[in-house]
Amino acid sequence: MSTAQELATVRKRTWGRADQAVRIGPRSAVVLALASAAGLMMFVWPLLVRVEPQSMQHGPDAPFVFIGILPILIIVVLAELSEGGMDSKALAMLGVLSAVNAALRPLGAGTAGIETVFFMLVLSGRVFGAGFGFVLGCTSLFASALLTAGVGPWLPFQMMCSAWIGMGAGLLPRRVTGKAEIAMLVAYGIVVAYVFGFLMNLWFWPFITGAEVPYHDGHISYVPGDPVLENLHRFAVFTLLTSTAGWDTGRAITNTVAILVLGPAVLATLRRAARRASYGRKPTFGE
Amino acid sequence: MGAGSPRARAAAYFLPRDLHPGAWWVWTLGLAVAASRTTNPWLLLTIVAVVCHVVVVRRGEAPWAMAFRIYLVLGATIVALRVGFRLVFGGAEGSTIVLRLPEIPLPAWAAGIRLFGDVSAESLLGGLYDGLRLATMVICLGAGNALANPKRLLKAMPPALYEIGTAVTVALSVFPQLAESVLRVRQARKLRGGTGGRRFHALRTIVIPVLEDALDRSLRLAASMDSRGYGRSGTARPRARFTTGLLMIVGLGGVCVGIYATLDGSTPRFLALPVLLAGLAVALAGFRLAGRRVRRTRYRPDRWRAAELVVAASGVAVAAALFLTSGVDPTNLNPSLTALSWPLLSWPPLAGVLLGVLPAFLTPPPEPTDNADVADAAEKVTA
């Protein structure tokens, strides 16, 4: 009987304790909020001013955005370190997971939106917390860009998007466990696939002219000086028509399949590593 | 050993010993950089052949050295995936259609995605060249993991990294450990029997144990080094630690910006080389400062001797050769994908790549490990 019961408890997989996820401290919360606000501005500023079309989108400002991101990453790490959200073993995991992500990205070849970098980001952000996910998003995109010759003015923006993906995964409700957790992560993976496509479209859209598609007659180009909301509306139509059903859906499918197949194993492994490394737990003696 | 006859000196030089792991990593990274400079399949295959030959001749018998074939499989997977995706999702960029597959019609709003349909030679070759380059780089990294002893690499780390010792230990040891764990877990499965079974079951019985074993063992190594006092800040004053930390972080930031600006052609040039060099200088200054503070002794330190210099020089020479010859024959270094032609090899880059095979002949063979001795002894006993 006991064996059967044991088996039953084993069968009811929880893949580690989800409620163990790293708590986010006030200092980290402030830093992440400020960084996200600044990050959002770097995407939407072309809507607020009049920009001229140019062949190299964001060419002039991208390097400075990149220079701006680096200190933000260091501040996030320092804030997390000082609040016990990260320790030296978490830093080691950050290095290892960045390398894993950098190695995963080329596997997908980037055709038809098959991006193999995001599912690992979602899973690690979920286990190690929002600050960790934020930093991991940036480091893994930078490392993989070096491997795949993907360095260009788009890189800082991709880094910011991935940082948000990792951070959001760390902010998901902590009480959800077991199959519900996997379902939640799959849903999150699908949402971020479309959000990533939306933001990366916004990166180039204001700088191109005469955007139109054969199956829709209507104005979907950026109009310099128009109110922000009208431009945003046109942009939403543009994104819906050009990429939502195509590459973004490919990305969503990849995320779903990867999280369903590998999610439980990876979650369990990462949680075990996190527990053994006992994040933020002070040792106690004589109990 | 000192002033013997040339013959005795050569014998001493070729005495079996393990080379400094840093030398192997320099050689490996040189070859990887060379691979990143070209998409010519012949050159890439030559690099793979060179790497395989050196690994087979000069690796020890440690588990991480035996795991080299995992990296070969990974490389083959990358190539197959890249070509396969081109086949499935619209490979029609180009005019030379080599395969006509029925296309699954998708509505017009599924912009940018095609399922099957005509496959052109150009897009297949694009996937092949790209995948091959990536696979070569992965195989080069695998060679580094196979040839360099990760534990001795830890020992040879500059003292400046002492304070983040735990992080560095885990980061350096987990990948060799991963390969080792694959072998351990597979062996255990074989011994248990019943390796058949459903595929997802197999996934669960291999992937989870491998990941957990690798992480566990590298964390355990870090913990044991930690408990022996490795990675303690020692007697340094907080102010000095702050200064060195700041120097290293600012330097690393400068290096990142420099690399970014170098690779992205559209950034202003003053951000590229000057910032890269300045970042390197600041980081090195931080390294020196931090290294001077740490006082520790090493037991039988690994030294750079002539053989190590030969290995490192051959790796650097390969990388340098591909940078120097890129102006000589650029069309064959990166074969064109618009006007299809048979990729040709020219002598300068080929000779450059072949320099990488020198360590197979000009270095001493690896020291036979204790395990091998034990196995030999066991065989003798049973015989």
Image: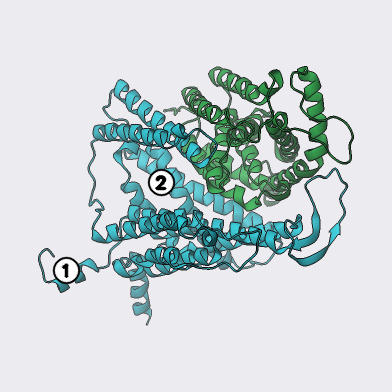
What crowding class fits label 2: few (fewer than 14 Cα within 10 Å), some (14-19), or many (20 or more)? Answer: some
Image colour assigned to chain A:
green
Mark 2, chain letter?
A: B
Q: Please state which of the two labelled residues, at mark 2 or mark 1, is closer to the viewer.
A: 1
Res. A57 image quadrant: top right
* Badge 2 element: helix
Please state if B252 lies on the left or on the right of B85 as rendered: left
Image coordinates for residue A220, horizontal then vertical, percent: 82, 30
Q: Residue at x 10, y 69 (%)?
A: B4
Image coordinates for residue A176, horizontal then vertical, percent: 71, 32
The answer to whether residue A50 is above or below residue A13 is above
Q: Residue at x 50, y 34 (%)?
A: A278
The mark that comes first in sequence, 2 or 1, is: 1
Image coordinates for residue B207, horizontal then vertical, percent: 60, 54
Image colour assigned to chain B:
cyan
Q: Residue farthest to the bottom?
A: B383
User: Pointer 2: what residue?
Assistant: B221
- Quarter of the picture containing the N terminus of chain B is bottom left
Image coordinates for residue B126, horizontal then vertical, percent: 64, 58
Residue type beneath disc 1: Arg
The answer to whether residue A5 is above or below residue A86 is below
Please state if B54 lies on the left or on the right of B290 as rendered: right
Mark 1, chain letter?
A: B
- Taking depth in this image into account, of A222 and B242 the one nearest to the observer is A222
Residue type beneath disc 2: Leu
